[in-house]
């Protein structure tokens, strides 16, 4: 995997040029079963052979222990114990993928890493028929050129299972007229639940969508409705909050659509993403987002969106 690892480390700047192209790069890996899994390359910091893991007491289910990585103690998580816990073929975990996600760094144990592919998000679909069991950990499905399916993991759901969902404390409400609202889109069930908790606490009305394509359809319908009423949309829709990585249409393309449609003039777009590196912030800026906030700190999210809602 040394060549692929070099690619991971050396081509981040090149990947920022993908912003607005509705393309993303996915690292393919195996858990020792017949299924192929994927994870967004931007979440990956390095790939190595599985190191010696220090067992610690009272670890959550799925956490094998901890390692020291450049002076930091990080948890090591067995993906097989979440995705295919009853499959004996998935127990030989020879490779570790170190990921950074929502300000958390952790190691994911897998059988092996295959390669990096570039995918069109309009060819990535939500697994609508997978509603229960371990399949809830799959956020999207795409297809390789040879017809083989790739299951893209919902890392937010896995981390919520390990470390628990974020507690949303009391946050002061903002003064927003009752006829005004905001719109948000996120493909993660965990993220949508956390966003709703914040919006409810600050007393803001909202509409939502589960992916970029659905969001764009809903936003166009909203714009058409207010256009027929001869009212500027910005008098009612105060803010659009978008995730970066979503099936069918990512947040970068969605932002480009919004910014190029005069009906949305004066409505700010805030990108809310677990991909919080400078490279990802640069990608957001390149398509015109008005602010970028990393997942998931309830206070930071509230502080970021409140000025836009009160303007």
Image (spheres, rainbow, N blue to C red):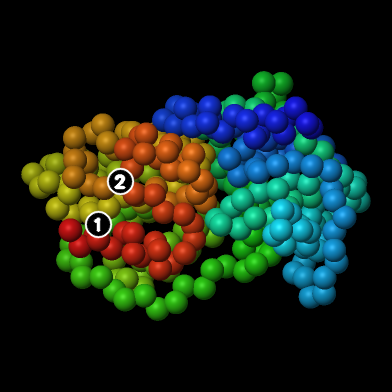
Q: Residue at x 57, y 67 (%)?
A: 165
Q: Is 136 left or right of 76, judged from the image as shown?
A: left
- Mark 1–mark 2 CB contact (< 8 Å): yes
Which residue has dot 1 on it?
Answer: 308
Q: Residue furthest bottom?
A: 170
Residue 308, x across and y down, in percent: 24, 57
Residue drawn at the location 52% of the way across and 51% of the way down? 274
> 44 or 268: nearer the eye?
44
Residue under numbered circle 2? 290
Above or below residue 48? Residue 173 is below
Label 2 element class: loop
Question: In which quadrant of the rendered view does residue 41 lie?
Answer: top right
Left or right side of 11 for 58: right
| Placement of the N terminus among the 4 image quadrants | top right
Image-based side of 91 in relation to 124, left or right: right
Residue 188 visible within the image: yes
Reading the chain from its start, which is encountered first: label 1 or label 2?
Answer: 2
- Percent x, y of residue 44: 65, 43
């Amino acid at each position: 995997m040394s060549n692929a690892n070099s690619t991971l480390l050396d081509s981040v700047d090149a990947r920022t040029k993908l912003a607005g192209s509705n393309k993303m790069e996915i690292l393919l890996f195996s858990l020792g079963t017949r299924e192929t899994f994927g994870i967004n390359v931007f979440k990956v910091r390095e790939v190595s052979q599985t190191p010696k893991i220090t067992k610690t007491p009272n670890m959550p289910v799925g956490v094998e222990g901890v390692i020291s990585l450049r002076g930091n103690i990080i948890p090591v998580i067995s993906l097989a114990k979440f995705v295919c816990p009853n499959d004996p073929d998935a127990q030989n975990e020879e490779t570790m993928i170190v990921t950074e996600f929502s300000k958390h760094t952790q190691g994911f144990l897998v059988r092996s890493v295959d390669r990096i592919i570039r995918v069109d998000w309009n060819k990535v679909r939500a697994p609508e028929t997978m509603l229960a069991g371990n399949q809830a950990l799959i956020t999207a499905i795409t297809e390789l050129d040879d017809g083989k399916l790739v299951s893209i993991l919902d890392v937010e759901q896995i981390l919520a299972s390990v470390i628990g969902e974020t507690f949303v404390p009391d946050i002061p409400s903002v003064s927003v007229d009752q006829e005004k609202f905001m719109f948000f889109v996120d493909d993660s069930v965990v993220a949508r639940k956390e966003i709703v908790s914040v919006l409810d606490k600050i007393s803001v009305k909202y509409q939502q969508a589960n992916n970029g394509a659905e969001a764009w359809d809903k936003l166009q319908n909203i714009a058409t409705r207010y256009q027929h009423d001869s009212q500027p949309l910005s008098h009612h829709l105060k803010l659009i909050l978008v995730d970066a990585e979503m099936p069918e249409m990512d947040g970068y393309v969605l932002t480009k659509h919004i910014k190029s449609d005069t009906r949305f003039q004066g409505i700010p777009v805030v990108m809310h993403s677990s991909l919080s590196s400078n490279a990802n912030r640069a990608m957001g800026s390149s398509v015109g987002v008005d602010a970028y906030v990393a997942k998931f700190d309830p206070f930071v999210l509230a502080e970021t969106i409140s000025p836009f809602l009160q303007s």
